[in-house]
Image: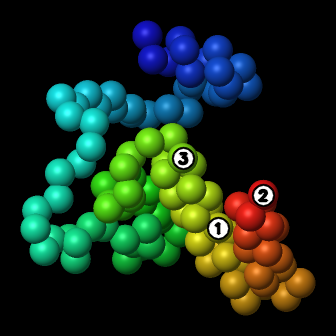
Amino acid sequence: MWLYHLGRIFPDLDQGRIRRFLVHRARYVEPLHGLDATHLIPKVGTPLQGLYLATTAQIYPALTNSESVTRHARQCARQVLQESTAGIPGLEGAFGQVATAEIAC
């Protein structure tokens, strides 16, 4: 069922390239954080080069609404672009500037 909807959203998607997918359902919308536990919130960058994590658990203490999620997604995208173009002559920082300008709009 999910693959059917995904194919309608992305008509050029080659479903044969999908090896596995998971559907998560949660009783509560907001992630719960314990007191003095902000150090446990996962970072966007991971120890594996080129692998990033973007999750609503990172938005704390803001509410997980569409504005916060959009802001977080743009910040994550900016980080990925900046780190992926770092050290490339002519591109270093170029995508980060575009993302920053877009966020300011």
Residue 84 falls in which quadrant of the image? Answer: bottom right
Q: Mark 2 against mark 1, which lies toward the viewer?
A: 2
Whichever of labels 2 and 3 marks the residue nearer the N terminus, that label is 3
Q: Where is residue 90 drawn, in percent x and y? A: 89, 84
Separation of marks 2 and 1 at Cα, in angstroms: 15 Å
The residue depicted at 17 percent of the width and 51 percent of the height is 32
Separation of marks 3 and 1 at Cα, in angstroms: 17 Å
Q: Few, some or many C-alpha atoms within 10 Å of disc 3 (few <14, some 14-19, many ≥20)?
A: few
Asked which secondary structure carries label 2, the reply is loop
Q: Mark 3 against mark 1, which lies toward the viewer?
A: 3
Name the kind of residue labelled 2 in the image.
Cys
Q: Few, some or many C-alpha atoms within 10 Å of disc 1 (few <14, some 14-19, many ≥20)?
A: many
**Residue topped by disc 2:** 105
**Residue topped by disc 3:** 67
Image position of 45 with respect to 16: above or below: below
Image position of 64 with respect to 14: above or below: below
Separation of marks 2 and 3 at Cα, in angstroms: 13 Å
